[in-house]
Image (cartoon, rainbow, N blue to C red):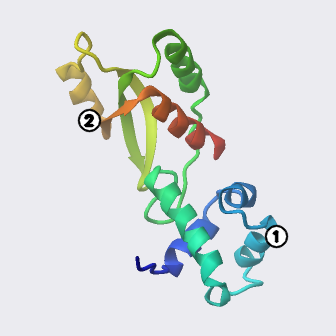
Amino acid sequence: MENIIDLSKIKKLLDSDISAYAISEETGLTRAMINRYRKNESKLENMTIKVALKLQKCYDEKFNMGLIGDSGQNISYDSEELIAELKEDITDFGDFECWAWIKKIDGVKIYTNYDFKDGATQLTKDEVKTAHENGEQFEILKAKHLLELLEKQNEIL
């Protein structure tokens, strides 16, 4: 398998508001090393391939989760109430399938609401119309996966 290093992705990650601590936890790199790259004390083009691949993987994961947009920008979104509600529903109903409301803000995917997806509960035409008017879309997710995404989205605060 061929690995291609994209320094622009690494730069977007380092320029984002994601803390050095969070990047360190995910990559195993030290916060000091991350901060040296952020302050331009160490040049990106001089980093080892191993370090570059770790940072690029971190960027890709954050991007795929919608935590970093195309511009490298990330968005904070307070999800505490939604997290509490979802945890209660998971306790009561298990890992159910749900409709997740998504809004893209500056290319960043934000989860804003959810509803049960089962044979008895379907989205109404009015819900779909209102969501689209508000620039929202839907994804079908398992409740525990949505909870993970909401907690990640919330930890950027």
Amino acid identity at mark 1: Ala
Q: Which residue is mark 2?
A: 133
Look at 65% across and 84% down and name the residue there: 48
Residue found at the far front of this picture = 1
Residue found at x 73% / y 67%? 29
Pick the quarter of the image with the N terminus.
bottom left
Residue drawn at (51%, 72%) of the image: 9
Q: Residue furthest left?
A: 125
Quarter the C terminus occupies: top right
Residue shown at 62% from the left, 78% from the top: 50
Instruction: Give the percent coordinates (x, y) of residue 117.
Output: 30, 20
Of marks 2 and 1, which one's residue comes earlier in the chain? 1
Q: Is residue 68 visible?
A: no
Categorize mark 1 by other alpha carbons within 10 Å: few (<14), some (14-19), many (20+).
few
Q: Position of residue 79 (x, y in %)?
A: 57, 31
Residue at label 1?
32
| Amino acid beneath label 2 | Glu
